[in-house]
Structures are given as structure tokens and as C-alpha cells.
Amino acid sequence: MIKLHDKYFKPFISAQAIDSALAKMADEIANDIGDEIPVFIGILNGSFMVVSDFVKKYPKPCEVTFIKLASYEGVKSSEDIQRLIGLTQDLSGRTVIILEDIIDTGNTLAEVHRIFKNENVKVLKIATLFYKPEAYKKDFKLHYVGIEIPNKFIVGYGLDYDGLGRDIPEVYQIKETQHMTNLVLFGPPGAGKGTQANFLKGKYNLVHISTGDVFRYNIKNETALGMLAKSYMDKGELVPDQVTIDMLNAEVEKNADANGFIFDGFPRTNAQADALDKLMDSKDSQINAMIALEVDDEILVKRLLERGKTSGRADDADEAIIRNRITEYYNKTAILKDYYTDQDKYFGVDGVGSIEDITVRLSTVIDNL
Ligand code: IMP
Ligand code: MG
């Protein structure tokens, strides 16, 4: 994710995808035109990169020139097109191909047609790398379209947001929702974390990232990170935090549209909490709260023994083991409670009561963040 001025943008079209689209357009155009020498006209400023890369791919001799029009203010196209540099050569009888970076409403294109109305060119064709069909309001034919995209503002590869972003070699799309609510969910075994996480993700449009699930997924699918993690596990060693963080990073990036995340099972140490803070910071986000479900030990033991009767989980069947797991949980998480308390981000929530009651308590905390 990148930030230009006040807005966030997420990766959208790779440099490689752009390259193939341009190569395809260059071939198509060369085939259609035959041996004639065309004049390619770029519309400045946005098209400087398209034109430069396109003509390098064009397999035959050609001429290149530019006109300069301006229409955009911020992230909105305007009707009022200014002609800043017009045509500077006689094009009568020539085959002219307009090379656009992007066609949005088509206002700019209307101005291009006005400019060429009395030029007596032999052929006027329109080629554009990007095209937003949902935004297009005109009837002019578009002869060559590289990539159709949804009606969302993009930057990079010549396209700017208030002057910034033109230099980026790939294309980013505006991110309309930011990661607003990022929670670390804690609770001893049997506290009802899973049940509540499930509910919260629906209500707040959050993505539930359970470290255990992420590990299993990466190992099962033999991703590079999964194989790396496995190599440590096979040796009986702990997976380094960085590997886990890299996996979480991939999960966060996969879900750029989410309102936020529920982290479950991570962090477990101060170092991991630090690493998670850094990860969120690199996404212009932050952990907003650690929410811990608090349930009295005796109740937990009862719940887990109850669950053991039906779940068949061996570690839910033996009271001594259950008590041990609970003790371990408190030993391990005490440090994290301090970590988040120091940042005023620790919220303990009473985890005893009906599912609905607990849900209401959690929502109250989140709504007040
Ligand atoms: P149109 O006149 O609405 O078709 O818009 C054409 C011009 O607006 C393009 O040449 C760009 O300069 C600018 N534009 C349109 N959409 C975008 C976008 O998503 N990002 C950046 N600039 C855009
Ligand atoms: Mg333009």
C-alpha cells in the first residue's frame, strides 16, 4: 500500500501486465496500418510513459509528437478541458493514432476530436492503455484498448493524484476503506474466542486472522513461507517471528479492502507485539485494541470438561491438563497485558454469560474505540 497526499492506494496492475498489454496493442496497430508511417500523438501529461514504452515496442518506423490537455482536478474529471499545447505540425493526409494513458469520461477525447475536425487527416484512430467503461459517456469509437478497469481512481505509470505518482512503474488503485479496526483477541482456552471472533468479523467487516490457520494453510499449500516455517518445525525449532510476520503480512495484503483485522494467536511475546505494531505501521494502520475475554478458572475448567465429552479432544478430557493450559495462558499473556495496557489499549471483557450478552459487551468496547 502507498500513500499520496491524503489518500491510500493499493497495488492493482503490475508492470508486467502493462508491458504485455502494450506489446499486444503495438502488434495489433502495426498489423492494421501496414506500411504507412503513422504519427503517434500522446496526450500530455499522463501519456508520456505509455508513449515512450509503446513506440519502443512498435515494430516499424513511426513519428511521435504530443499535445497537452488538462482536465483533472484531484480525483474528478472536469468538463472544462484546457488546451495547453496544440498541434505544431501539418497532419493532412496522415494516419494519426492518439495514444492515451486512460479514457475515463471521454471529455478529453471529445476535445481531441474537436482539434482534429479541420486537420484533414487520412485516418484518426484512438488507442488507450486503460479504459473505464462504466465512466465513459461519449460515443467516439475506441479502436484499441489495452486494459479495461473498474471506475476507480488509479495512479502510477504516468497517472497522478495531484501531481504525485506519475513516476511509479506499476498501477495502484485508490483504497476507499482503510483498516480502521484492528484487534488482538485474547482469551484462555474455553473463553469463547472462536464464537465471538466469528460474530465480530460479520458485524464489523473484519478479517479473522488465526495464526494457527495461516500456518496450516501455508504449509498445506507449500508456499515458500510455509516450506520455510516447516523446515524449522521439522528440526523441532521455533519458527522465527519474521517468518510468521511475513505470513501475516501476506494475509493483510490479500485483504486490502477489509475494515480491519482480528488477530488471534499472535502476538505471544513482546517482540512479536513490537513486530505486529511495525507491520501495521507499514500499512498506515495500527492495533486499536487488545480485547481479552476474562473467565474465572473454575468456569473454564467446567466448560472444557463439558466440551471434552463431545469434542473428543484429548486435551479437553483431563482436568489436570486443562488447569495446566489455563495457567500457561496467564503466565504467557501477562506480559502482553502490560504491553497493551501501557498503550491504553487493553480491554478486559467479562466472558461469563450468554453468547449474546458477551457479544454486546465486546461491541460496546469496539464502538467506543
Ligand atoms: P476523461 O477526459 O474523463 O476521459 O479523462 C481523461 C484524463 O483524466 C486522463 O488523460 C487522465 O489525465 C485523467 N484521469 C482519468 N482517470 C484517471 C485516474 O483514474 N487516475 C488519474 N488520472 C485520471
Ligand atoms: Mg491524459
Image (cartoon, rainbow, N blue to C red):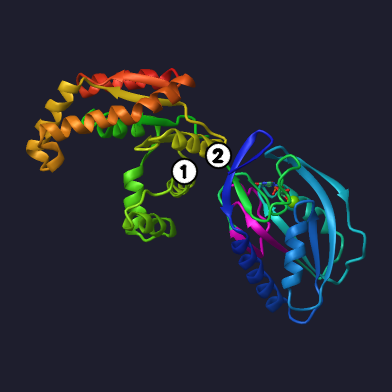
Magenta span includes 144? yes
Q: Residue 103's x, y, as percent?
A: 67, 53
Would you place residue 9 above or below residue 37 in this image?
above
Instruction: Name which residue type carries label 1.
Output: Val
Q: Where is residue 79 in the image (x, y as percent from the top left)?
A: 74, 41
Q: Give the crowd class for mark 1: few <14, some 14-19, many >=20 residues within 10 Å.
A: many
Left or right: 2 in relation to 331: right
In the drawing, does residue 173 fall left or right of residue 298?
right
Compared across the picture, whether 88 is left or right of 272 comes to right
Q: What residue type is labelled 2?
A: Lys
Asked whether the residues under the numbered discs 1 and 2 touch, taking CB atoms below 8 Å apart as contact, a structural biologist would say: yes
SS for callout 1:
helix
Question: What is the span of residues highlighted in magenta in the rendered image?
Answer: 126-147
Measuring from the top left, give residue 48's x and y in whole percent. 78, 57
Q: In which quarter of the image is residue 89?
A: bottom right
| Along the viewing direction, whichever of 79 and 37 lies nearer the viewer | 37
Q: Is residue 134 visible?
A: no
Residue furthest to the front: 236
Image height of 110 relative to 324, above or below: below
Q: Please state the horizontal and vertical placement of residue 82, each as a whole percent of the image.
A: 83, 44
Q: In this view, does 166 lie above or below 309?
A: below
Which residue is depicted at the point 43% across and 48% down? Answer: 240
Q: Does the magenta stretch include residue 254?
A: no
Viewer can see residue 109 = yes
- The residue under label 2 is 283
Q: Which residue is drawn at 71% across and 46% down?
A: 165
Q: Residue 342 carries which label?
A: none
Q: Name the residue under label 1.
A: 252
Residue at 32 percent across and 46 percent down: it is 213
